């Protein structure tokens, strides 16, 4: 592989390797690991995040898994709320829901969430304070 490969080529290659790996978690893990090693060898580390995000979006769409990015005021709050949030969101998709946790101390308390790339939900004390003064 050379550096002339773009994001679309890498996503296709990763999908192909995962498909060839079958159902075994170990085989899938090995296939993904060798894919990343190939990207690093080609000095394409800058694309790794983009490839993973695109692959995850396509995989989740195919398996009917909802994707949520949730910002919590602290990692502790996120660890406590994320599993419950995942369970609640899973009812809208037959494959369940994947919740990516982020930390945002500006929230004060609560959660801000982007679900399936479309729906922004904010339930935080910060929003309540801003509403009081607007």
Image (cartoon, rainbow, N blue to C red):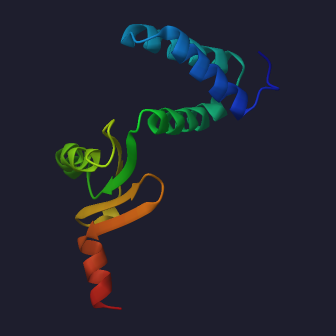
Please report the residue visible at 71 percent of the width from the left and 23 percent of the height from the top.
43
* Residue 109, position as x, y percentages in the image: 22, 64
From the image, which quarter does the N terminus lie in?
top right
Quadrant in which residue 129 is drawn: bottom left
In the image, 33: left or right of 98?
A: right
- Residue visible at 31% across and 49% down in the picture: 92
Q: From this view, report whether residue 10 is shown above or below residue 84.
A: above
Q: Nearer the viewer, residue 109 or 25?
A: 25
Q: Position of residue 60 (x, y in %)?
A: 45, 36
Asked whether, in this view, residue 11 is left or right of residue 94, the answer is: right
Left or right, 131 with reference to 10 = left
Which residue does the image show at 49% across and 9% down from the upper left? 21
Query: Which residue corresponds to the image point at 54% horizontal and 10% vertical from the top-left?
Result: 20
Residue 41 higher or lower than 98, as above or below: above
Who is closer to the viewer here, 12 or 95?
A: 95
Which of the pair 75/7 is nearer the observer? Answer: 7
Quarter occupied by the C terminus: bottom left
């Amino acid at each position: 592989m050379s550096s002339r490969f773009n994001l679309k080529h890498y996503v296709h290659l990763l999908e192909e390797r995962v498909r060839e790996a079958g159902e075994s978690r170990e085989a899938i893990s090995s296939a993904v690991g060798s894919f990343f090693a190939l990207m690093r060898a080609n000095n394409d580390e800058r694309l790794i995040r983009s490839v993973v995000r695109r692959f995850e979006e396509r995989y989740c769409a195919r398996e009917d898994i909802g994707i949520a990015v949730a910002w919590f005021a602290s990692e502790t709050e996120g660890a406590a709320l994320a599993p419950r949030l995942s369970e609640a969101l899973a009812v809208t998709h037959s494959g369940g829901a994947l919740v990516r946790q982020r930390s945002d101390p500006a929230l004060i308390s609560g959660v801000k969430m982007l679900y399936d790339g479309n729906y922004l939900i904010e339930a935080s004390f910060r929003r309540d304070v801003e509403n009081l003064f607007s």
